[in-house]
Image (cartoon, helix red, strand yellow):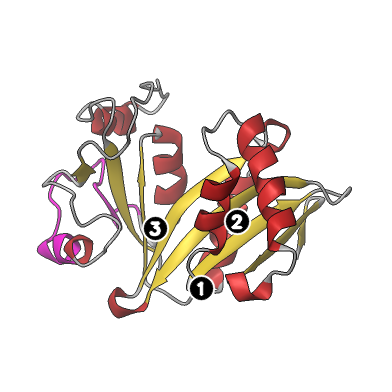
Amino acid sequence: MTWYGWRICFGVPANFRNKETIALQCLDVANAAQFPTDFDDVFSHLFGNENYTICMAFDKNDQLGGFSIFAKLEDIDTLHLHGIVLHPRAQGQGLSSKMIQTVIENSNTTFLTAKTHNPRMFETLAKFACTSSDYYPNVEDINIPISIYELVSNNEFVNSADEYLIVRNAYPDEKISQTFRNNAISNVFKRLNTMDAQVIVVKVK
């Protein structure tokens, strides 16, 4: 599909030919975004699991602007976002949201989960909730339903989260705390230490 000059494509690893070329393009994007990684790490994240979904955005010159990786967890009706990386020239144009939207619309799942240290990504994901109360932790209601805790405990990517849906020591290195204009979301992230990640659970349908 084409969206404001960007060509958005997605699929499972088996759909992609020239995997090494794609991995090199993704590595270039990650390097430009100052995301610490290497070729082997990028390749394994993209193509190491046949059940993953990869979504990529190319500009009019067929240059990669960004990519994202998702896992579909059929047993808990959940789509898990592993991560999104955008080239600096592609940032600020809504590409993250568009890639997420594209995969959600084609996954037919009820829940979207992710873990992040970035308040902006938290806000982006929360916007996909059915209603303003259908994401957790919710900035307006600190109570998290038991059903959400059960969903998280059965999600292999976030099942170590605590009562605040925080994964402690999620990253091997410290992350810089980011200021954010939304005070309610900023307050959520005040609970995190520099190596922690906030889990977000979003009911998308």
Give percent across and percent down for residue 101: 56, 60
Q: Residue at x 72, y 47 (%)?
A: 25
Q: Residue at x 26, y 34 (%)?
A: 196
Give percent across and percent down for residue 61: 89, 48
Mark 3, other Cα within 10 Å: few <14 / some 14–19 / many ≥20: some
- Residue type, numbered disc 3: Ala
Image: magenta residue range: 132-150
Task: Name the foreground residue: 119 vs 33.
Answer: 33
- Position of residue 65 relative to residue 74, above or below, is above
Give percent across and percent down for residue 115: 34, 47
Q: Residue at x 32, y 34 (%)?
A: 172
Lateral position of residue 137 relative to residue 46, left or right: left
Asked if residue 127 can be seen in this view, the reply is no
- Residue type, numbered disc 1: Glu
Q: Say whether marks 2 and 1 touch (CB < 8 Å).
A: no
Number of marks in the rendered image:
3
Tag 3, which secondary structure? loop
Tag 2, which secondary structure? helix
Q: First in sequence, mark 1 or 3: give its number.
A: 1
Residue receiving disc 3: 129
Q: Is residue 201 magenta?
A: no
Label of residue 50 in the image: 1
Asked if residue 138 can be seen in this view, the reply is yes
Lateral position of residue 196 relative to residue 96, left or right: left
Q: First in sequence, mark 3 or 2: give its number.
A: 2
Quarter containing the N terminus? bottom right
